[in-house]
Image: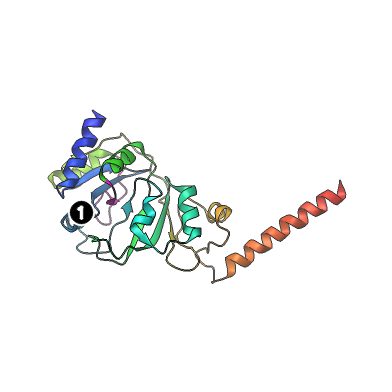
Amino acid sequence: MRTRGIARAAEVLGEQRLVVLPTDSVYGLAADAFSREGVHALQRARGQGSGPPPPVFVPRPRTLDGLASGVSQMVRALSECFWPGPLSLLCLAQPTLDWGLDSNTVLLRMPLHPVALELLDRTGPLAVTSATRVGGPPCLMIDDAQYDFGDDVEVYLDAGPLSGGLASTVVDGTGEVPRVLRAGALSLEELRAVVPEVLGLGDAAGEAPRQAASDRQAGSDRQTTGESGS
């Protein structure tokens, strides 16, 4: 049943139509990221008009280089550590790609749900946003998505009730140093454990690197003190 549903969803997406799929914590509304018609249908279904471009889900970390340009080693390290998972990375879009997103940036994420990943493995990148009308609550049940979208969506992939919880943490990777744009499921401490230079919401440029150096020195001082007292 699951295999047939995913196969049908991949076929529908290739025809520039819409699918509802499970993500890490909520249901999402998906279209082919490379189809202008599909992305605009997604935006119309949600009632958002043109609006900002939706995030793009990818099937694997190495897809980052195919979709984004100027990816720094710091951004790459974050993707390799936290994908799949609740990390969204704002990147400069590859200029050679014919995006249906009308933007020179793209928000990329690799979700942590087996159904979503299996579908992405068949389709490639998908534009995905919350499966709810603009301003509505997060969609945790497939019945709620069906109530909202009805025949506007061709395939609904039912994975049962989802957990909800915090949204993904959004990190801006377009600058010299990654910066948190939205706090979420991944804490700043978790990000800095991988890339100490990551700037928090209120940090000024250069603050995180100085703090990271201070933390490393403090750790070294504590280690030295411990050794001398043993």
In the image, residue 14 sits, relative to residue 183, either above or below, namely above
Q: Nearer the viewer, residue 114 or 204?
A: 114
How far from the left and from the top, in percent, is residue 189? Answer: 57, 54
Please, what is the three-letter code of the amino acid marked with disc 1?
Leu
Quarter occupied by the C terminus = top right
Residue under the image location 27 percent in, 41 percent down: 122
Whether residue 128 appears in magenta in the rendering, the answer is yes
Please name the residue shown 12% across and 44% down the image. Answer: 151
Q: Which residues are magenta?
A: 124-139
Looking at the image, the residue that sits furthest to the right is 229
The answer to whether 207 appears left or right of 114 in the picture is right
Say if residue 185 shows up in the picture. Answer: no
Residue at image mark 1: 42
Exactly how many numbered labels are in the figure?
1
Image quarter in which the N terminus is found: top left
Q: Is residue 171 left or right of residue 10?
A: right
Q: Secondary structure at mark 1?
A: helix
